[in-house]
Image: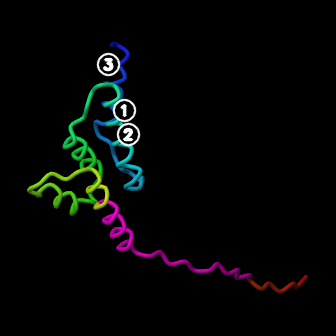
Amino acid sequence: AKLSWGCIKQVKSHLKNPPKDSQSVTEFSQTIKARADELALLGAFMDKDYLIEKILNGLGSNYKELISVVQVRDTHIIFDELHQKLLNFEVHLLEKKPKQLYFPAFANPTQRANTG
């Protein structure tokens, strides 16, 4: 029992404030889902609403519009539906991102007269 309690505590500590950072939406949500599955295997089941809350809390300010929409819903959202909405929103964010212009590098050698 002590080993399980220690494992449960460790998995829960990873879920306290999981930041998305530079992960893709899929990597981020699957990481949290994997932690929930670990807890279930240890006999400590995570409430589905708590799982959704953890994902939403870790997304960051780029996703605030989507987070607001999900939070004001009259019905609960399930993981698969949230994941699909996050993927669509991630595509939207990538399309909005300003395109970086690349200019070819040119060598501009200076001409020096050899007077010597």
Question: Which residue is at the far right?
Answer: 116
Residue denoted by label 2: 34
Q: Which mark is residue 95?
A: none
The image position of residue 69, as x and y in percent, is 16, 61
Q: Residue at x 36, y 50 (%)?
A: 20
Q: CA distance from mark 3 to mark 2?
A: 18 Å
Please report contact status of discs 2 and 1: CB closer than 8 Å, yes or no: yes
Q: Earlier in the sequence, mark 1 or mark 3?
A: 3
Q: Amino acid at mark 3?
A: Trp
How busy is the neighbourhood of tag 3: few (under 14 within 10 Å), some, or many (20 plus)? Answer: few
How busy is the neighbourhood of tag 1: few (under 14 within 10 Å), some, or many (20 plus)? Answer: some
Q: Amino acid at mark 1?
A: Glu
Task: Assign a secondary structure to mark 2.
Answer: helix
Task: Reply yes or no: does residue 107 show up in magenta.
Answer: yes
Nearest to the observer: residue 8 or residue 61: 8
The image position of residue 78, as x and y in percent, is 23, 51
Q: Residue at x 42, y 52 (%)?
A: 23
Nearest to the observer: residue 47 or residue 13: 47
Residue denoted by label 1: 38
